[in-house]
Amino acid sequence: MRLYDRPYLILAATTLIWSGNAIASRLAIGHVSPMVLTNLRWVGTLILMLALAAPALRREWPEIRANWKWLTVMGVIGFTGFNALFYIAALYTTAVNIGIIQGAIPVMVLAGAFLVYRTPITILQAIGIVVAIAGIVLLAARGDLSVLTGLAFNFGDVIMLVACLGYSAYTVALRDRPKISPQPFFLALAFVALVSSLPLVAAETIHGTARWPDLTGWLIILYVSVLPGFVAQLLFMRGVELIGPGRAGLWVNLVPVWAAILGPLILGETFAWYHAVALVLVLGGIAIAESGKRA
């Protein structure tokens, strides 16, 4: 069997690449600033997507043009906003924390679908949401009750939580997505992300915090453009094609697991007891919610 026909291997590789984005965001510190990284990431990804999807873009251009306002909002929130906040968060928190918080996106989407579309939620799904949120709160509090009472949360954790809430809103809104096939749809959003990140680079430059990449910075940009930004998207689409969106979506739960492994292994980050408990709560909450969904 060809490698491209092995869904579980494909999806495991996809989540490994996505978790590597958290590692890359930490490695980027001192080599390229967050907004410059956000912008140049989309430059690289857009070049690759144009090479792949330009014919489909031309074919579906009338539908894209007719929905440009919707695509602009989605690109700003789901692509520019998420990645900009993601890379800012990395300045203040660890890759392990980033991965665990990112792992809570499925239950955020579940809650968002209920709030916006009144999608029914079972008792088990509600329990799963509460358990996963408890994991995020424990992580943000670093296992210290005084942090909760004093609201002295890590700034990076809060920023990452906001990023995930924005991406969850983007995911929920995909329910009303225009009838555009995946590749030109992604290409259109990547173009929006590139354009809408330019003011962020300008603001960073005006404030004197912009840092253009050195050699290490360019290698990081190459990684996030090619692997998380391009290859992982294609692999995930293939995984969905092979086993369906519901089963493929469950594999996103591996992202915090990979981050918990790679953070200490590559960056030497500490994996404390509250990381372990938060990881169990987040993954357990998702498992309970998915069990409720199947029921």
Image (spheres, grey):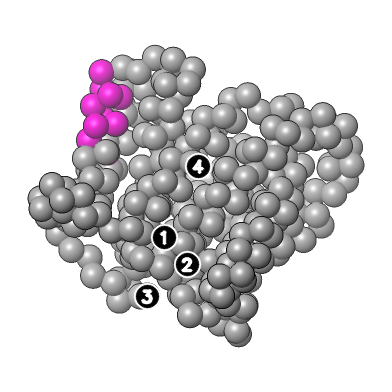
Please give the name of the residue rendered at 65% of the width and 38% of the height, measured from the top-left corner: 73
Give residue 25's mark. Answer: 2
Please give the name of the residue rendered at 57% of the width and 58% of the height, measured from the top-left corner: 228
Residue 67, image x, y percentages: 76, 30
Q: How far separated are the C-alphas under marks 3 and 4? A: 27 Å
Residue 263, above or below 194? below
Give residue 167's mark. Answer: 4
Camera-nearest label, 1 or 3 = 1
Residue 152, above or below 188? below
Q: How far separated are the C-alphas under marks 2 and 3? A: 13 Å
**What residue sits right under mark 1 in the picture?**
89
Which of the two discs, 2 and 3, labels the residue nearer the N terminus? 2
The residue segment tinted magenta is 123-132
The secondary structure type at the circle numbered 3 is helix
Which of the two discs, 1 and 4, labels the residue nearer the N terminus? 1
158 is within the stretch colored magenta: no
Give the residue type at disc 4: Tyr
Asked whether disc 2 touches disc 3, contact meaning CB atoms under 8 Å apart, the reply is no
Which of the two discs, 3 and 4, labels the residue nearer the N terminus? 4
Which of the two discs, 1 and 2, labels the residue nearer the N terminus? 2
Residue 53, image x, y percentages: 80, 48
Residue that extends furthest to the bottom in the rendered view of this protein:
215
Residue 205, image x, y percentages: 62, 71
Give residue 43's mark. Answer: none
Q: Crowdedness of circle 2 by 10 Å Cα count: few (<14), some, many (20+)?
A: many
